[in-house]
Amino acid sequence: MIGVGQNCPTSGFPSYYNCSDIAQFVINYPNCTNLPSTLRLPYDGGDLTNYPGLTQLDSISGSVDCDECEITSFAGLSNLKYVGGSVNIDEPHDILTDLYGLTNLSHIGFSLSLLECDDLISTNGIENLKSVQMVKIVECDNLVNIVGFDDIDSLPVGLIIEETSLTNLNGFNNLKFIGILSIYDNPLLNNLIGLSSVSTVDNIEITENISLQSLLGLDSIIPNQITNLILRENDSLSYCNLDNICEYIDQAYGPSTIYANNTNCNSILDVQNQCVTPTPSWDCSITGCYDPGTGIGQYTTLSACQAACNATDIYSIDNSEKRILIKIIDILGRKSKEIKNQPLFYIYDDGTVEKKIIIE
């Protein structure tokens, strides 16, 4: 993909080119489609189409850098397919709402970094991206829409999402492998379901996402592939006891830092208590026996519960019984007097229930 044998410079070229240098570059190398080092985006405002020489380039060996640049779109880079380094967009000073213009970009050698992009609403414009090692989105306060990552199934370095207005991570539905997963201070983020296809993560850090209630979406991650787990200061987070998280903690596959979340996820012990499966037990109700899921039901076996719950007496009351009758209810659960020829439930002080029909 990089221009080789196309009369491109192979030595003596600068470590970076400004966009204003590209006009001379295409004059010197009219058949070269590869920029051999980094391209710096302009500081003087306008559109990249003001630099027509850029359309000759289909690859850049270095990076594409916007360090407080002033552009409104990437339209002038519409033929760019390959970036050997990173695409870094850091604090653009003009109104950049999406990534339009990078439509043909399919390969980024290292990272796509979107930092302090205050006007960025969507990542629309990178729909052909096939390969990148890391995605880092930080302080993009108005970002609400993640698109363009449908063909990305691996981010071996990591995925970092910090200080955005995202409510979900649905744009990453096809990801399977992530190096470092860091989700930090996204106040509107309420679920992680967009990561449901992820099976391998090295390091998980979920921090200060005040609307996040559950870790559902991380339940496909293989627990012994996790090397570090941090869950802290997520004010609403109360469901952390996924099976894989329980196994990771129980087997001590790596360190865990858990604190300042909501009830049931406020500490390692808190999560462990939720991970414990209660011993089966049963209680009797009007409709039959049921396991309350607490481990402290009245009967330790289902058969004992059924024997008591389904007991039917035809006017045979044992006078030696020392139980105290608390109340009688009918089949609808309404309090009742003793009525003949009608099924009634007799509830005693020891918790037992008898179903009786007194036949006249």
Image (spheres, helix red, strand yellow):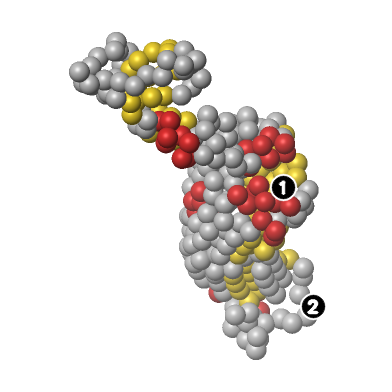
Look at the picture and state if 334 lies above or below 205. above
Comparing 242 with 281, the one in front is 281
Say left or right for 157 vs 174.
Answer: right
Residue 359 location (% of width, % of height): 22, 21
Say left or right for 10 vs 313.
Answer: right
Residue at the (77%, 68%) spot, across then down = 15
Q: Secondary structure at mark 2?
A: loop
**Number of marks in the image?**
2
Report, in whole angstroms, how far the alpha carbon at label 2 lies from the one at label 1.
55 Å
Residue 117 can be seen in this image: no
Q: Quadrant of residue 209?
A: top right
Comparing 66 with 136, the one in front is 136
- Residue 12's mark? 2
Q: Say which residue label 1 marks.
A: 249
Q: Secondary structure at mark 1?
A: helix
Task: Please state which amino acid type lies under the numbered disc 2.
Answer: Gly
Residue 17 location (% of width, % of height): 70, 66
Residue 24 location (% of width, % of height): 65, 72
Residue 353 location (% of width, % of height): 41, 24
Residue 196 can be seen in this image: yes
Residue at the (57%, 62%) spot, across then down = 176
